[in-house]
Amino acid sequence: MATKVAIIASNGSLFDAYKVFNVATAAAASDAEVGIFFTFEGLNLIHKEGHKQLPIPEGREHFQEGFKKENIPSIPELLEMAKEMGVKIIACQMTMDVMSLDKDAFVDGIEVGGAATFIQYASDANITLTF
Amino acid sequence: MTIQTDHVLDAKGLACPMPIVKTKKAMKDLESGQVIEVQATDKGSLADIQAWAKSSGHQYLGSTEEGDVLKHYLRKASESEVKEDKDYPHIIKNDELQEKLDAGEKVTVLDVREPAEYSFGHIPGAKSIPLGELENRADELDKESEVYVVCRTGNRSDLASKQLADKGFENVKNVVQGMAEWSGPIEKDQ
């Protein structure tokens, strides 16, 4: 049976996005079934506009050059790739309500669910990660 | 050494996890048994490609380094290779073959894996004819001599042994478990 990976993304900086999407795409490329639950600031990573301009943590702006130099793919590219490889994207309903955002504010192809949705998905996961 | 491949993937200049993601995509277009060369400059790809091969079930053959470029060689796995039953009745175990070779017996070892697999390590003196070419190249072998057919796990060599027997070879034995478990001496292309 394929490996199942369940990820919680709860932070919204550019670095957090790389941690989440690098692991998710690598897992999906290795034939794992991958699901990510985006909650609180993590929702930035799949926000239609927000995910294209994620903030770099203060004082770490010089990393920008490194990303460029090493030819690191952009977050929109990684997100697109993740979706293409079948990574399941679940946005947290409760956070969306708190922030008064509806599904249209996010990239296409996402699901919306609550904590129970994630728990159910993760209940038979082999790997569970939180970022 | 020159390694024969069916497909070359250029992943140079790409960072983790792109070499893996690209490899996964390229693999889809390959036929089972074909070999891909993945060129990468990401140093992490050396460990990652091997780990990826393990989790995806494809066969990692080896890597070479030319300047800054790492070249990884992988062979696409096929469903049929996982099957356990081998039909050809005459078999010889790895260690029995090794004893014969150690004793200096004059036997023919026929390696039916892909050329790239052969390049990364084969039984010294083994003749390389990939399974797909055996049909046309069987006459390169001596019908009278004992032929020991080897591949990685004994499945391709099972098919090859049957082909040879059908062509009138009388002393053909399939080597099990094959190169995956081979503990004897190994020769590599330079």
Image (spheres, grey):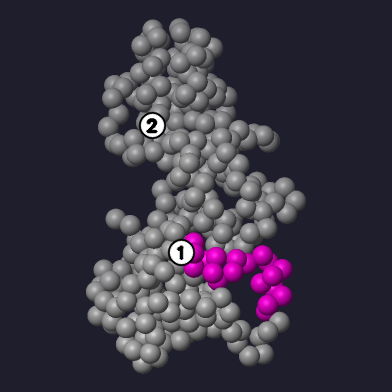
Whether residue A122 appears in this view of the structure is yes
Q: Secondary structure at mark 1?
A: helix
Question: Which residue is depicted at the point 46% across and 64% down?
Answer: A82
The three-letter amino acid code for the residue at tag 2 is: Gly
Residue A56 lies left or right of residue B158; in this view the side is right
Viewer-side residue, B166 vs B10: B10
Cα distance, mark 2 to mark 1? 37 Å
How packed mark 2 is, by other alpha carbons closer than 10 Å (few <14, some 14-19, many 20 or more), is: many
Residue of label 2: B154
Residue B98 coordinates in the image, percent (x, y): 46, 29
Question: Mark 1 = which residue?
Answer: A82
**Residue B89 in magenta stretch:** no
**Where's residue B11, x and y in %?**
62, 52
Please state which of residues B42 and A104 is positioned toward the viewer in this rendering.
A104
Q: Amino acid at mark 1?
A: Ala
How many numbered circles are shown? Answer: 2
Q: Is residue B7 above or below residue A78?
A: above
Residue bounds of the magenta highlight = A63-82
Q: Nearer the viewer, residue A2 or A96?
A: A96
